[in-house]
Amino acid sequence: MLPVLPALRELLPGGLQRGSVVAAGDCSLLCLVLAAGASIAGGWCAIAGLPDLGVVAAADAGLDPGRLLLIADPGEGWPQVVASLLDGCELVLLRPPARPSAQVRRRLEAVARRHGGVLVVAGDWDGAQCRLIVARQEWTGIGSGHGRLRARLVQVVADGRGAAARPRARWLWLPGPDGAVAVVATGIGGLGIGGLAGRDGETGGVASPWRGMSAG
Amino acid sequence: MSKARGAPRRVLAVWCPDWSPDVPDAGPEARAFEQVVAAVAEFCPRVEVVRPGICAIGAGGPARYFGGEEALARKITDAVAALGIVCRAGVADGLFAAQLAARAPPRDPAGASAGTGTPGVIVTPGVIVTPGATPAFLAPYPVSVLGVPVLADLLPRLGIRTLGDFARLPVADAANRFGVPGARAHRLARGLDPRPLTPRQPSADLSVHIDFDPPAGQAEPVVFAAKALAGRMQAGLAARGLACVRVQVQATCADGRDITRLWRHDGLLSALAVAERVRWQLDSWRASQDAGRSDAGRSDPERSGPGKRDPGEASPAGGIIRLRLVPDQLVRDEGRQLGLWGDAVISDRVARAATRVQAMLGHEAVMRPVLAGGRDPAEQVTLVPFGDSRAPLLPAGRPWPGRIPAPAPATVYPVPLAARVTDDAGDAVTVTGRAEASAPPARLSAGGGPWLTVTAWAGPWPVSERWWAAASARRRARFQLVTGDGNAWLAAVQDGRWLIEASYDLTVDATASC
């Protein structure tokens, strides 16, 4: 297993299964946070197909820029590039330039299993062992003409196959006020969101935890 | 040796002003200078690279062969100019004077022939100082050209401003007063050489090769031999205390064709890693051969038979008869000290993967980020190709007042997206010279995308950067905007136009789809 940040441990118990594929939706910061655990543990990460990535945000999320390879444009032969990267890096974050065929998907899944690397896909991937999506989000600290962006509350829902089959939802600071990811403490704004959002599978009726928070 | 002992040799120096003196020795600029060295080596194989930008050859023999020093200088400058590189050549007694002659400002040729210039100086694309005239040529130069900071500071305060003044001091006094560096500088000022020219050993001397008889039809035996060969090359370099920046792998086929490619080495590749690069080179060449052959087979049906042969079975060009490893750009091996901890050590596994991707996509395709300073999100990262080392453009760890506070945006557009921002009435929002918004922003369209409702905003925050330099001066007013879809944007108004500099989350595709 590859470790994940403490804030994600409830969503991904045990971490990321080596040799697996994780689909992380379109939220680029969520992908970065997934990769940060492996980077902090001393592993190398490669990011392919995200030419506009904010490296400062990645560093704030916990990725070590010294152990990061950026391949802005993996080009036509991207499956070969990703296979080579999986050979050298613990974790490869990929946004596929095109929708992969079933054959390409199976080949890359086999490469990941052989080398024990984790492929995190920014976007969707049929047959991913684990899926994470951002269900809701709201920024705090900014008003109408005053304040500034300070932090964002997001509700992340994780589901997957096998042991990860039951959907789990958690409220996270993504990013928190210092750029890092953190679990939202229970009881913010007088609402026991830990009691509501904390129950497994309850993704629908979660009350907004930032009610009553003052902007800024 | 016909010359008097200690008399400096005639030296021709080639100076290319495009390379600045502070170029690092092993960087890409140094690599680019290799083509100049190669052009000069056509005239005389023993080229000394003083630094990237300046190289020198002993002028005696080549000048006799090419019909005089002036003709030689002209031929060399023409050859380098044919590469599209500006260069000048100078000839004088000794390397120091030759460098100055190459860099001497071109004087009016008519004036020189009329004898108004320094006697004994002939003007060409550079300057040619006739034998024996070097002390007179050097005399007017300020002492700072000696490149000894202590003397450059001290001598003018003693009233010695030019090399001529310095050369007039008695030798013993100069050595007594200024020590070894002073004695060395005094020899330079008198037009003598502090040390003889040490031409770079031709790289071929350190190259190693192995012959295959019968020709190796498959890649495996060649790769296996390459491992032992690389070990021999490494041992040969280590015995001289050298390391090479690049290694050239040259495989010769039975039909006489050469497969040549340069690989970055930096003294870090193990024998196994060199062998692996030989395999990649043979694989890619074989793939291109097979592709070419099947194309040819389509046009010529008779040749379609061999085109279907298993590519791993036999080499198309009759097998490899010789494999040769040539160390390139030799540098002194200074070893590598790894950090005790906290240092990002690149393991062989990662380096192999990165180099392999570079072989597929090109050197610049695999980047490593270095955090830098700056106010813009885009400025705060410098990307360095894997294998190179480069300092960030702007130093990190300084305060940079006015930079956007944390959290940092997750998507930074290298070229800002054009955007449109309107108020409730549908009029474009503008910012006054006193940094006040004309109206609260209500709707945003980023990069030609659909209109999004602005639910929260902050700004404008004015930034006026580098107002003292007209070319890079920039005045911007920044806003943070949160839109109805939950995304947050870093926008700016510059010259009346709205730009999206960064987005706090979504990627480009997502903006197009939502």
Image (cartoon, rainbow, N blue to C red):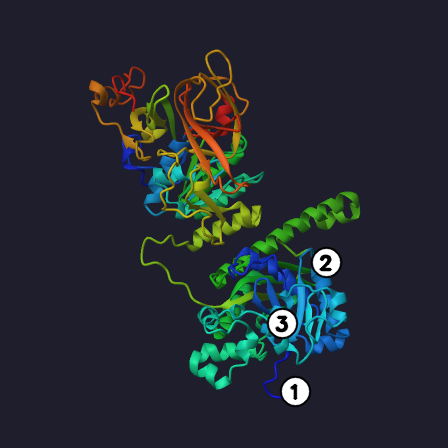
Q: Nearer the viewer, residue B418 or A29?
A: B418
Question: Which is closer to the viewer, label 3 or label 2?
Answer: 3
Q: Which residue is mark 2?
A: B82
x and y percentages locating residue A119 in the rendered image: 43, 38
Image point (71%, 46%), residue name: B294
Answer left or right for B62 relative to B479.
Answer: right
Could you say whether the residue bearing mark 3 is in a helix, strand or loop?
A: helix
Answer left or right for B308 relative to A193.
Answer: right
Q: Which residue is mark 1?
A: B3
x and y percentages locating residue B246 in the rendered image: 55, 61
Q: Is residue B21 above or below residue B465?
A: below
Name the chain under label 2. B
Question: Which is closer to the viewer, label 3 or label 1?
Answer: 3
Q: Are marks 3 and 1 on the same chain?
A: yes
Q: Is residue B419 above or below residue B76?
A: above
x and y percentages locating residue A165 in the rendered image: 33, 26
Type of residue at label 1?
A: Lys
Type of residue at label 3?
A: Ala
Q: Residue furthest top?
A: B425
Q: Which residue is mark 3?
A: B98
Q: Residues within 10 Å of mark 1 (few under 14, many from 20)?
A: few
Q: Is residue A43 above or below residue A27?
A: below
Image point (36%, 34%), residue name: B405
* Circle nearer the N terminus (2, 1): 1
x and y percentages locating residue B101 in the rendered image: 64, 69
